[in-house]
Image (tube, grey):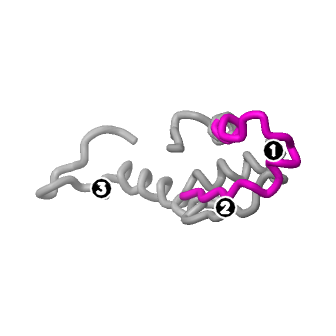
């Protein structure tokens, strides 16, 4: 299931819940227990964590595998303010030494 960056992680977890519930059909809670293995890449790992935790689907989950998931946030958060400051001071240059256009 693809992640839509325009939606919240909680909304994506709710969409995941709809997909998993449709797969199980009329299965009981006991039949669902430990049946799901979730593999999440990047933000998909956070979606899976919300699905398991906030939506309470952890009993259904046999395993959660995450790859490249920003569990502790994005490491580039401090880079953007420095880049904006440099551009505002005229240190950002375009091709052939021209000033970069536009405002940040």
The residue stretch that appears in magenta: 19-41
Query: Which part of the image, by quadrant, shows the C terminus?
Result: top left
So how many labels did they put on this image?
Answer: 3
**With 102 as the anchor, is 59 left or right in this view?**
right
Q: Evaluate if marks 2 and 3 touch, with contact meaning CB atoms under 8 Å apart.
A: no
At x 77% / y 34%, what residue is drawn?
26
**With 65 as the anchor, is 85 left or right in this view?**
left
Q: Secondary structure at mark 2?
A: loop
- Of residue 11 and residue 98, the one placed in the foreground of this image is 11
Disc nearer the start of the sequence (2/3): 2
User: Disc 1 or disc 2, which is closer to the eye?
Assistant: 1
At x 25% / y 47%, what residue is drawn?
100
Local packing at callout 2 (Cα closer than 10 Å; few below 14, some 14-19, many 20+) is few
Quadrant of the rendered structure where residue 77 is? bottom right
Work out how far the residue at label 2 is from the one at label 3, CA to CA, in angstroms: 32 Å
Work out how far the residue at label 3 is from the one at label 1, CA to CA, in angstroms: 43 Å
Q: What residue would you read off at disc 2?
A: 71
Q: Secondary structure at mark 1?
A: loop
- Of residue 50 and residue 64, the one placed in the foreground of this image is 64
At x 30% / y 55%, what residue is drawn?
92
Which numbered tag is attached to residue 92? 3
Q: What residue would you read off at disc 1?
A: 54
């Amino acid at each position: 299931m693809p992640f839509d960056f325009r939606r919240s992680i909680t909304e994506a977890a709710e969409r995941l819940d709809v997909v998993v519930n449709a797969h199980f059909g009329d299965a009981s809670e006991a039949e669902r227990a430990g049946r799901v293995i979730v593999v999440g890449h990047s933000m998909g790992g956070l979606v899976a964590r919300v699905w398991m935790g906030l939506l309470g689907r952890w009993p259904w989950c046999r395993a959660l595998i995450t790859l490249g998931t920003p569990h502790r946030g994005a490491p580039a958060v401090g880079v953007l303010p420095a880049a904006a400051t440099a551009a505002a001071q005229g240190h950002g240059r375009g091709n052939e030494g021209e000033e970069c256009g536009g405002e940040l």
